[in-house]
Image (cartoon, rainbow, N blue to C red):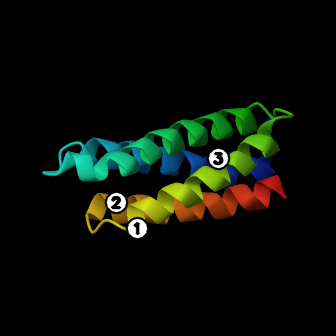
Amino acid sequence: MLNSSYQSCIQACSSCALACETCAASCLREEDVKMMARCIELDRDCADTCAIAAVLMTRDSAYAAAACKLCAQVCRDCAEECAKHPHDHCQACARACRQCAEECERMAA
């Protein structure tokens, strides 16, 4: 049975992963893609890290807390980078990353 204390963190990780994938795809369509390179890199790393954390929590894995700790750090880094860009997709991603970081920090504590 799924540990219900993970539910809000799993949801935040899933939402963040989708926001990051959306941001990366949108960044690739921006006029100056080179300027968006770091954002795209972090979006991809963050999306993957969020997905792994969500899966490990779903399994009630012994590694879930460690994954969430890493996820929180990647989310904070991604939020910081995305917040530098004025695009709506970057701003939405930054918000999702901050929310996920907070949830993961609670989970990993």
- The residue tagged 1 is 83
Q: Earlier in the sequence, mark 3 or mark 2?
A: 3
Q: Residues within 10 Å of mark 2 (few under 14, many from 20)?
A: many
Q: Tell me which corner region of the image, top left, top right, bottom left or bottom right, holds residue 25.
A: top left
Q: Residues within 10 Å of mark 3 (few under 14, many from 20)?
A: many
Which one is in front in this view, the residue at disc 3 or the one at disc 1? 1
Name the one closer to the observer, 30 or 11.
30
Measured in 3D between alpha carbons, the distance from the residue under mark 3 to the one under mark 1, in whole angstroms, is 23 Å
Q: Secondary structure at mark 1?
A: helix
Q: Secondary structure at mark 2?
A: helix
- The residue tagged 3 is 10
User: Which residue is located at x 21 percent, y 46 percent?
Assistant: 33
Q: Tell me which corner region of the image, top left, top right, bottom left or bottom right, holds residue 105.
A: bottom right
Instruction: Say if 65 sits above or below 103 in the image.
Output: above
User: Which amino acid does the dot numbered 1 rest on?
Assistant: Ala
Instruction: Say if 98 sits above or below 11 in the image.
Output: below
